Amino acid sequence: MRHQRSAALQAQRITIALIDSSAGYETAPDRVRLGDLARFTDDVQTFLRSDSKEVDTQNLDVAIRQGSLAIETAPIAAAPRLFADLQTLLGNELLDGIEPKRKAIIERWQKAAHQTRGLSYRISAPLLRRPVVVSADTDYRADDADQWVQVERYIQGEIQDLGGVTKANAHVRLPDGTTLTVTTEKDLLRDDQINRLYQTAMLRI
């Protein structure tokens, strides 16, 4: 406990990593979609600066690391609110105790991680006993927010389209006329011997 307190008072290097294989390859410093890079760097800047503006992100030196794509800051000193919010994220998935802008970033990352297979985020620093991870297995939320629950459903509908450039998916027209997009595995579509286009099928999702 004494060691953690003294570490929190020292300048800290914060490393925030984007881990993403949803494009069919592992995101890395030498290959990343431009839109993903722009959104991630903007999120990192907002997360560090947040509402209290303890961190001067305009003049903060950073390094781009593997991991998949990780932004490591120069040592940050005198940012007690940032350090406190990191400790809160490590110990509790309820977001009500952290700054609003930081909270909004984590909520957006959590939603994206639940919706996109192979996507997660990791925050590490010397003051943390382990990294903060936002992934499909976590449930960071405000106290009054809807909670994500893993469910399994069977649906019946006509398959309108199969494939996808970056993500394998099926477009299914339901009996009520709405269309549902279902993410699947490329191997499943490639190895299927039956032409299911414009056929009614029962799907487990």
Image (cartoon, rainbow, N blue to C red):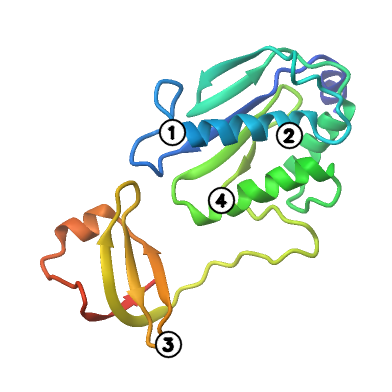
- For mark 4, give the secondary structure: helix
Residue 113 falls left or right of residue 31: right
Q: Earlier in the sequence, mark 4 or mark 2?
A: 2
Q: Which mark is residue 33?
A: 1
Q: Which amino acid, mark 2?
A: Phe
Q: CA distance from mark 4 to mark 2?
A: 16 Å
Q: Amino acid at mark 1?
A: Arg
Residue at 79%, 29% in the rendered image: 49
Instruction: Please name which of the two marks, 1 or 4, marks the residue nearer to the observer.
Output: 1
Q: Is residue 140 visible?
A: yes
Where residue 77 sits, quadrant-wise, is: top right
Tell me how far mark 1 sits from mark 4, CA to CA: 16 Å
- Identity of the residue furthest to the bottom in this view: 175
- In the picture, the disc for residue 112 is 4
Which residue is found at the position 30% from the left and 54% from the top?
164
Give the structural element (helix, strand or loop) at label 1. loop
Asked whether the residues under the numbered discs 4 and 2 touch, taking CB atoms below 8 Å apart as contact, a structural biologist would say no
- Residue at mark 3: 176
Figure quadrant of residue 86: top right
Q: Which residue is mark 2?
A: 47
Query: Separation of disc 3 and disc 2 at Cα?
Result: 42 Å
